[in-house]
Structures are given as structure tokens and as C-alpha cells.
């Protein structure tokens, strides 16, 4: 198993992003608690179908893959002489994986028991889901800055891709909802970076 991760770990980031896109397409956005009534929020979760359960478990897979990618990337940075910034990929991946875990736990509670929970509790948990982008933001900034700042030393990604990483990090820290563009740029950056790192690490092996 370890050899498999060492060989293909760089691709886990790309796979996780593809799976995340599928999850978002199935789930959609949680109801806006500032615009919907409590009854509408409860009805939203009660009426969710089997696809929501599938996306929930797929989201857990996303968190696991992201965490493994972060560990692989941190190790790759360390092997190429990076010291201070080497842990950033793993730490960023932990933030994203924790966000996915909280998202899954919240959705599990709502899908399983929304109609039996107090209305105020359903609205509160749904509101948490609506604003759960914060740990993802922390993780994305750590990953893009850490990997991009190490690009020249490690040659894992080209310099032009490093600049896209910096741009993604900058956009991410602009107050919401503009930062949403940064999420899209990060997804493209991670997809390309994962494939590039896989090819370059394999060529260097």
C-alpha cells in the first residue's frame, strides 16, 4: 500500500478535485438561512434523495484522498531540500480534510434526522454548512503558497503554475463572496499541479 501511495500519491489531488466536483454537482448549495424560513430549511433536508447519501460518502473519500496527497507532497518537498515550507501541504490538506469531515457529519445528521430534530437545531446545523468554507480557505492558501514558493527549488511544478498558485491564494483572502473565484482557480491549479508533479516525480525516480 505504501509503495502504491509513493508511486501515485501525486495524482490523489487530481482525483479528489474531480470527486469534489461530482459532490458539489449532486449536493448543490445548502439553503440560505437568511432568506429561507425555518420550515423551508427543514423541508430541504427532509426531501433530499438517495443522491445526497452517495455524495456524502464520496465527500469522505475526497477528504481521505486530499489528506494522502498532502502527505505525499510534503514528503516530496522535504526530499528536495525544502525545510520550513515542507509541512504546509500536509497542514493545508488536514484543514481541507477536517472541513470535509465536518461537512459529512453535519449532512449525515440532517439527512438522517432532520424531521425529528428541533427546527432551531436543523437551521443551526444548516447555517454551519453554509459557512463551512473557512477551513477550506485556510487549507487552500497553505497549499498554494507552500508548493508555489518551493517550486524553483523542487522543480515539481513550473514557474508559471507557481504564479497561478500565488494568484489563487491572493484571491482566496479577498472578502467573501469574491473569494469564491479563488476556489475555482485553486481547483484548476490542483488538477494541473497533481498531474505535473506525478510526471516530474516519476521522471526523476
Image: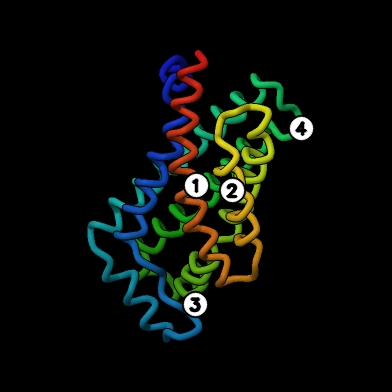
Return the residue at label 2: 165
Where is residue 102 drawn, in percent x and y?
51, 53
Front label number (3 vs 1)? 1
Residue 194 can be seen, yes or no: yes
- Residue 84 got which mark? 4
Give me the residue at 35% from left, 46% from top.
19
Badge 1 marks a residue whose secondary structure is helix
Question: In the image as oriented, which residue stretches furthest toward the front?
Answer: 160
Of pointers 3 and 4, the one earlier in the residue sequence: 4
Return the residue at label 1: 189
> Which residue occupies the foreground of this view, 107 or 79?
79
Position of 199 relative to 88 (above/below):
above
Are circles 2 and 1 on residues that touch, CB within 8 Å? Answer: yes
Badge 2 marks a residue whose secondary structure is helix
Badge 4 marks a residue whose secondary structure is loop
Front label number (2 vs 3)? 2
Of pointers 1 and 4, the one earlier in the residue sequence: 4
Where is residue 76 drawn, in percent x and y?
59, 24
Q: CA distance from mark 2 to mark 1?
A: 7 Å
Of pointers 2 and 4, the one earlier in the residue sequence: 4
Residue 139 can be seen, yes or no: no
Where is residue 100 drawn, in percent x and y?
48, 50
Give me the residue at 67% from left, 23% from top.
78
> Which residue occupies the foreground of this view, 163 or 17?
163
Are circles 3 and 1 on residues that touch, CB within 8 Å? Answer: no
> Which residue occupies the foreground of this view, 23 or 73?
73
Label 3 crowd bin: few (<14), some (14–19), many (20+), radius 10 Å: few
Return the residue at label 3: 120
Amino acid at each position: 500500500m505504501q509503495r502504491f501511495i509513493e508511486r501515485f500519491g501525486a495524482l490523489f489531488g487530481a482525483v479528489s478535485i474531480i470527486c469534489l466536483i461530482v459532490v458539489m454537482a449532486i449536493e448543490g448549495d445548502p439553503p440560505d438561512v437568511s432568506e429561507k424560513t425555518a420550515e423551508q430549511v427543514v423541508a430541504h433536508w427532509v426531501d433530499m434523495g438517495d443522491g445526497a447519501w452517495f455524495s456524502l460518502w464520496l465527500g469522505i473519500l475526497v477528504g481521505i484522498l486530499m489528506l494522502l496527497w498532502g502527505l505525499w507532497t510534503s514528503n516530496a518537498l522535504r526530499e528536495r531540500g525544502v525545510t520550513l515550507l515542507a509541512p504546509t501541504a500536509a497542514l493545508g490538506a488536514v484543514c481541507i480534510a477536517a472541513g470535509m469531515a465536518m461537512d459529512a457529519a453535519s449532512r449525515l445528521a440532517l439527512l438522517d434526522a432532520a424531521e425529528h430534530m428541533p427546527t432551531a437545531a436543523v437551521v443551526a446545523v444548516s447555517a454551519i454548512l453554509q459557512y463551512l468554507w473557512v477551513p477550506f480557505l485556510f487549507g487552500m492558501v497553505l497549499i498554494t503558497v507552500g508548493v508555489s514558493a518551493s517550486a524553483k527549488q523542487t522543480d515539481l511544478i513550473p514557474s508559471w503554475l507557481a504564479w497561478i498558485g500565488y494568484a489563487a491564494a491572493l484571491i482566496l483572502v479577498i472578502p467573501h463572496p469574491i473569494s469564491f473565484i479563488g476556489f475555482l482557480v485553486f481547483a484548476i491549479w490542483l488538477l494541473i499541479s497533481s498531474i505535473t508533479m506525478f510526471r516530474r516525480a516519476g521522471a526523476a525516480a
